[in-house]
Amino acid sequence: MISYGRLRRYPLFGGLNEGQLKAIAMISNEREFAKDDVIFGENTTAGKMYIVVEGDVDLLYGGGGEGAIVDAPVGSIAAGEIFGVSSLLEPYRYIDTAKAAKKTKAIEVDASALRALCEVDHHLGHALLQQIFQAALERLKYTQIELAAARA
């Protein structure tokens, strides 16, 4: 468990009330990862969502299957950003590998418990969904810029 006051620092939790923050804090822990630690692997069961407190996380894509690219970098996550949001949507499988680019601290949220909270408190679910969509759209825009630059 972490202090609910720590959660207030992150845009993901903007718009939530004290009770909602306390409920999320109860299902959250701080984790530390050494450089090159694999936080989760592509196509594994997604049970946790993360917010980087300090450090950086690289996202890598292998593509799966025979002849796949091995660990192609597809993004990086900096302090204050979320990753592992696949844990909130069926089929609850991570779509890439997350690896600590350097010593990293992150808040780890139990996704199953968070989904249960959202089922009971629809305002909480709606507020989180808006922030997650915003983060996903920002990542998509970055990916479009990278793809356009690669094709130029």
Image: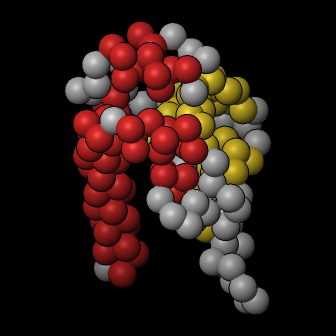
In which quadrant of the rendered image does the C terminus lie? bottom left
Q: Specify whether 41 is left or right of 115.
A: right
In which quadrant of the rendered image does the N terminus lie? top right
* Residue positioned most to the bottom: 66
Relative to 77, residue 59 above or below: below
Please report the residue visible at 70 percent of the width from the left and 26 percent of the height from the top: 32
* Residue positioned most to the front: 120
Relative to 92, residue 63 above or below: below
Nearest to the observer: residue 63 or residue 27:
27
Residue 55: horizontal and vertical position, in percent? 57, 30
Q: Is residue 141 visible?
A: yes
Residue 149: horizontal and vertical position, in percent? 34, 71
Nearest to the observer: residue 12 or residue 101:
12
Please report the residue visible at 72 percent of the width from the left and 32 percent of the height from the top: 33
Q: Is residue 149 visible?
A: no
Please report the residue visible at 59 percent of the width from the left and 50 percent of the height from the top: 58
Please report the residue visible at 28 percent of the width from the left and 25 percent of the height from the top: 16
Relative to 65, residue 12 above or below: above
Q: Specify whether 122 is left or right of 35.
A: left
Nearest to the observer: residue 148 or residue 141:
141
Q: Specify whether 34 is left or right of 111.
A: right
Residue 60: horizontal and vertical position, in percent? 61, 61
Which quarter of the picture shows residue 39? top right
Relative to 95, residue 150 above or below: below
Residue 111: horizontal and vertical position, in percent? 55, 43
